Amino acid sequence: MVKPIPKASSGGAMSDPRAFVSFDFDNNETQKILFAGQAKTDSPTPFTVHDWSSKTKLPQSQWEALVKRKMASTNMCIVLVGRSMNTATGVAKEIAMAKELNVPTFGVYVDGANTSSTLPAGLQQNRTMAWKWDTIARAVTQMMGEGKNA
C-alpha cells in the first residue's frame, strides 16, 4: 500500500501544480477522463490535474493557439501514451509546444501501451512510466524542479 502524499495547499511552499494532459483525442479520451478524475480525488499525488486539454475538435489554427495559451499556463505536460500514438499527430505537436515553452514533460502508459509501444515524437522512453500514482507523484515532484519551474 502506498502512503498518500498530501496534496499541495494553496498556502504551502509548492502551490498546486497545473498539468496539461496530452492524449490521443480519437483513441484515449476515456483514459484521459479517468486519469484526470482520479488525480482530483484521493490519488497519492502532490498535485491535482487541472484538465487544460481541448474539449472539442477545432480548426487547426484555433487549436494551436488555444493549446499554446493553455500550455504556457501550466507547470508540466503529462502525455498519456496509448497504443495508437503513431497516428496522434496532435500529441507530437503538443510535446513540441511544451519544449518550446520550457514546460517539462513526462509520459504515462494507458490503454494497454507499455515499454514496447511507439512513443510520440519528442517523448523520451526514460520519462515514460506505468500508471502508478506513487511513480507519477515522484515525476510531478521532479517536474516542479525542471524547465520553467526551476
Image: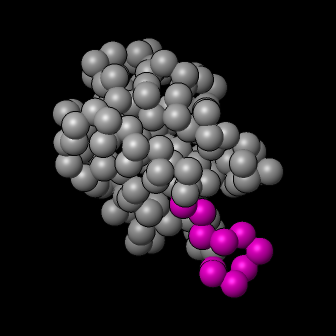
Picture colour scheme: one colour
Q: Quadrant of residue 88?
A: top left
Q: Quadrant of residue 104?
A: top right
Question: Residue drawn at (61%, 33%), measured in percent from left and top?
Answer: 100
Q: Which residues are magenta?
A: 9-18
Question: Residue drawn at (46%, 53%), measured in percent from left and top?
Answer: 70
Give the vertical position of 8 relative to 67 (above or below): below
Left or right for 36, reference 126: left
Which percent across, then down, holds residue 135? 59, 47
| Name of the residue lying farthest toward the bottom | 11
Give the vertical position of 109 relative to 18 (above or below): above
Q: Main secondary structure of the magenta part?
A: loop
Which percent across, then down, holds residue 11? 69, 84
Question: Residue drawn at (63%, 81%), measured in percent from left and top?
Answer: 10
Give the vertical position of 27 relative to 66 (above or below): above
Left or right for 137, reference 131: right
Which percent across, then down, holds residue 139? 64, 46
Question: Residue drawn at (48%, 18%), measured in percent from left and top?
Answer: 121
Residue 143 vs residue 93, the one in the foreground: 93
Q: Quadrant of residue 113?
A: top left
Q: Is residue 132 visible?
A: no
Which percent across, then down, holds residue 101? 62, 40
Give the vertical position of 56 relative to 118 (above or below): below
